[in-house]
Amino acid sequence: MADRGESGGRAERELRRSSDRRGAARLDKVFPVWLEGQRGGCFGVARNISEGGLFIETRDPLPLGSQVRVSFPSQWGEMTAVAEVRYVCHLLGRLADGAPAHGTPHAAVRGMGVRFLYFEAEGAIPPVVH
């Protein structure tokens, strides 16, 4: 009986792990990024970066499957990655305490989860992103 419970718990953990798209550990760090894609360029706020990608809050997320150049500061200078949009998020909710934020009791988050395809070499001529 103990073995059945142990294997059942293990199976449940495996199911949870396989259903989570985030395979790598994430760092909950917030920093500005510059985005360039099919609609031009804009600033975004990066969150939850991992080895494989990150989430970027932006007013106008790109469509699924789009490629985007993400440039972000680092202690060694600016770094740029080419990434693919894998997830798009448009959330609208109420603030927990009901207090208005800028005149409205709602909070909104828009953004996209991207998967890194590759990092550009410093000084390289950027390829056309589509």
Image (tube, helix red, strand yellow):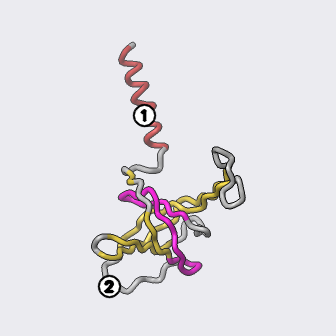
Of labels 2 and 1, the one closer to you: 2
Horizontal side of 106 relative to 26 (left or right) equals right
Q: For the residue labelled by badge 2, is the local secondary structure a helix, a strand or a loop?
A: loop
Q: Which residue is mark 1?
A: 13
Q: Residue at x 38, y 22 (%)?
A: 6
Q: Is residue 100 above or below residue 13?
A: below
Amino acid identity at mark 1: Arg
Considering depth in this image, is 99 or 68 the residue closer to the camera?
99
Considering depth in this image, is 90 or 15 the residue closer to the camera?
90
Q: Residue furthest top?
A: 1
Amino acid identity at mark 2: Gly
Q: Which residue is mark 2?
A: 123
Q: Is residue 14 above or below residue 129?
A: above
Dominant secondary structure of the residues highlighted in magenta in the image: strand
Question: Which part of the image, by quadrant, shows the N terminus?
Answer: top left
Magenta-tinted stretch: 36-57
Q: Residue at x 33, y 70 (%)?
A: 74
The x, y position of residue 47, in whole percent, is 46, 59
